[in-house]
Image: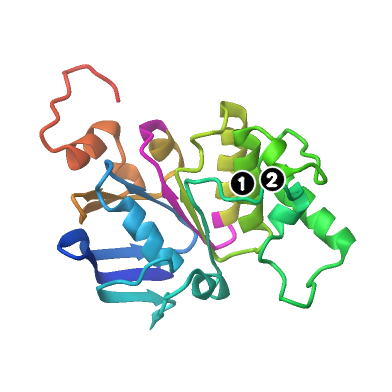
Amino acid sequence: MATAMLTMSSVTKRYGETMALADADVAFAPGHVHTILGENGSGKSTLVKLLSGVVRPTAGEISLDGRPIELGRPVDAHRLGISTVFQEVLLAPERSVLENIFMGFDGLLTFRLSKAERRSKASAALASITRTPLDLDQPAGSMPLAQQQLIVLARSLVRDPRILILDEVTAALDFGDRDVLFGAIRAFVETGRLAIFISHRMDEVRRLSDRVTVLRSGRVVETLEAGQITGPRLLSLMLPDTRIPVGHHV
C-alpha cells in the first residue's frame, strides 16, 4: 500500500444521540480512485461532509501528509487542496456558465486570472469531462441538469485540487459524458493526486475503483483492494444477509 495522503483515525460524528459515523479508520493513498460504498444511511454523506469541512468530527483525527488538520469550514478544505462536488447541483442560475465555474475562485477585490485566461481555463476543464460544447456566456440555470452538473464539476477542476471528492456526481450524466468523466478521473489520479468517489452503482464502482471502503450503519466494514472488488463481495459487505443465486452475475 502506498503511503497515505489523507487519513481518518477513529473519526466519530454524533448528532445528539444519533451516531452518524463511528470510529472510522480510512487511509487514502495518492494515485488512487478510492470509492466509498454503502446503502442510504451508511455514513457516506457524513464522511464527505467531514472531509469537506462542512461539519467537524465529534472525536478522532483527520490528517493530510501525516499532519493533523482542522477542517472547520469548507474554505479550510479548499486552502488545503481538497475540492468537493456534492450530489446536489449548486449554482447561481442567473449567472453565466463562466461566472459559475469561477464562483469563489477570486478574492474580494482581486482577480487571479485575466478574462482570456478564465475563458481558456473554463473551456479546458469542460472539454476534459464532456464532448458537448457549452456556451460560456449562457445563463447556467437555462441548461439541462446534466450540463449543470458538468459546470459544477468544472468549478472544482479549475482550482487544480490535490484531492477531488465526487459525491454521486454521475446520477444526471448520460453514458457518453460518464465515460469522458471517468477518463478525466483516471488522468487526475495518474498525476499522483487522489480521487474519492462516492457511488451506489455497482458497475461504476467495479470499473473505476482502485480501492473500495464499504460502510454499513455508520461503521467501516472493510476496505478492498482492486483485485478483491467483485459484485458478490461488495454486496456481502453492504448487505450481509444477501443471498446471491448460483450462476448470477452482479
249 sits left or right of 93 in the view: left
Q: What element carries label 1?
A: helix
Inspect the image, locate mark 1, and give the three-letter code of the amino acid beneath it. Ala
Q: Is residue 4 visible?
A: no
Q: Is residue 84 visible?
A: yes
- Near-viewer residue (146 or 82): 146
Whether 123 is among the magenta residues is no
Q: Name the residue under label 2.
A: 128
Whether 202 is among the magenta residues is yes
Task: In the rendered view, tell whether residue 115 sits above or below residue 175.
Answer: below
Q: Magenta segment range? A: 189-203
Q: Mark 1 points at which residue?
A: 184
Residue drawn where x is 38% and y is 34% of the image = 201
Tell me the CA gap for discs 1 and 2. Answer: 6 Å
How many other residues sit within 10 Å of disc 2, few (<14), some (14-19) or many (≥20)?
A: some
- Near-viewer residue (115 or 213): 115
Task: In the rendered view, tell whether residue 101 sits above or below residue 244.
Answer: below
Which corner quadrant holds the N terminus? bottom left
